[in-house]
Amino acid sequence: MNLVRAELERLAARRFVQLMVLLLAVAFAVTVATTLAGSHRPTPVELSRAQAQAADEVRNMELAHDRCLRIKAGTLTPDENDYLPRDCAQIDPARMEKLPAASDYLSGVFVFANEAEPLLYFLIAFLAMFGFLVGASYIGADLNSGGVVNLLLWRPRRVAVLGAKLGTLLGGLLGLSALASVAYLGVFWLIGEASGLTGRMGGEFWSSLGVVWVRGMVLVLLAAALGFAVATLGRHTSAALGTVAAYLVVWELGARLVFQILEVARPERFMLSSYLAAWLSGEARFWDGSACDDGIGGFCDGSYTLGWAPGLVVLLGLTAALVVAAFAVFRRRDLI
């Protein structure tokens, strides 16, 4: 317990961590100020006009569904411009998750229910970068400066020391991320109340937002563990940064171009970013141009999807492999 407390104090005292927290606060403040400047409380006239537009759109959707049913039943002849899905239930307004609302037709008005998820994705992206950089610098600086050697003189158990560092990093990051998320979304909810609209916030809204938040926190912790592991293997913070830069340039850009030239089928399957997007969004859809090059006419759907489960397996597997390798190398390597 004393080791964890000491590591938590060391983590909080690091200037780089304090700088990153300051940058997080600055980004937060800039986003809030930009939102306030671009939003206003809608007037009764604006609300009335938006409500009428939403009602018209819902009415048109109901008419389109009714027309589809009549065409399928053979009581109405379709026109050339008619869109006929395989099942009319696909365009049934009663089965849609979200119907047009007045808030969708308001210009210059911040609607919390519409903007909460994109704002949360922005926060998750920043926290993931924060976690990776802090995780890499936290262990990398100690390995490079000899701080780990001094710590081992006090607690000569390598696996316990490295485990305490990783556990402290993940626990502290999770606590900071939770507090930042509550403050972040809370402030924007207040903006919606005072200078915009809160929108529709039913049970499905909060459950959907909660799922995104949980996925985001998992991603933040994985990013921190990944930075920690790569920096441990490379014995320096720059090793983690260089590895990421090399991967992005050589594989995400270079290999992607090679796959396009060679016309490899479904190249997104080989990109880590694809699995990251699939995990964070729940499902990622991609297009495979080679799927429709068989010379057969007619409609061809070359799209394919990656679900959240493969995304989680790949991210967890990669991170676990690097963390295990880092512990194995740290246990046997000469630290001086």
Image: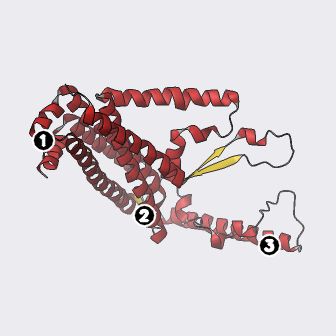
> Within 10 Å of the Cα at label 1, are there few (<14), some (14-19), or many (20+) other Cα atoms?
few
Instruction: Give the vertical position of 185 relative to 155 (above or below).
Output: below
Q: Quarter of the image containing the C terminus?
A: top left
Q: Residue at x 34, y 43 (%)?
A: 225
Tag on residue 155? 1
Q: Amino acid at mark 2?
A: Thr
Instruction: Give the vertical position of 315 relative to 110 (above or below).
Output: above
**Nearer-the-camera pick, 321 or 182:** 321
Q: Could you tell me if the residues under marks 1 and 3 are in contact, i.e. CB atoms within 8 Å?
A: no
Q: Could you tell me if the residues under marks 2 and 1 are in contact, i.e. CB atoms within 8 Å?
A: no
Q: Secondary structure at mark 2?
A: loop
**Can residue 42 be seen in the rendering of this structure?**
no
Q: Position of residue 38 (x, y in %)?
A: 43, 48
Give the mark nearer the N terminus: 1 vs 3: 3
> Within 10 Å of the Cα at label 2, are there few (<14), some (14-19), or many (20+) other Cα atoms?
many
Q: Secondary structure at mark 3?
A: helix
Q: Secondary structure at mark 1?
A: loop
**Nearer-the-camera pick, 125 or 165:** 165
Q: Nearer the viewer, mark 2 or mark 1?
A: 1
Coloring scheme of the render?
secondary structure
- Residue position marked by numbered label 2 in the rendering: 198
Q: Amino acid at mark 1?
A: Arg
- Residue position marked by numbered label 3 in the rendering: 69
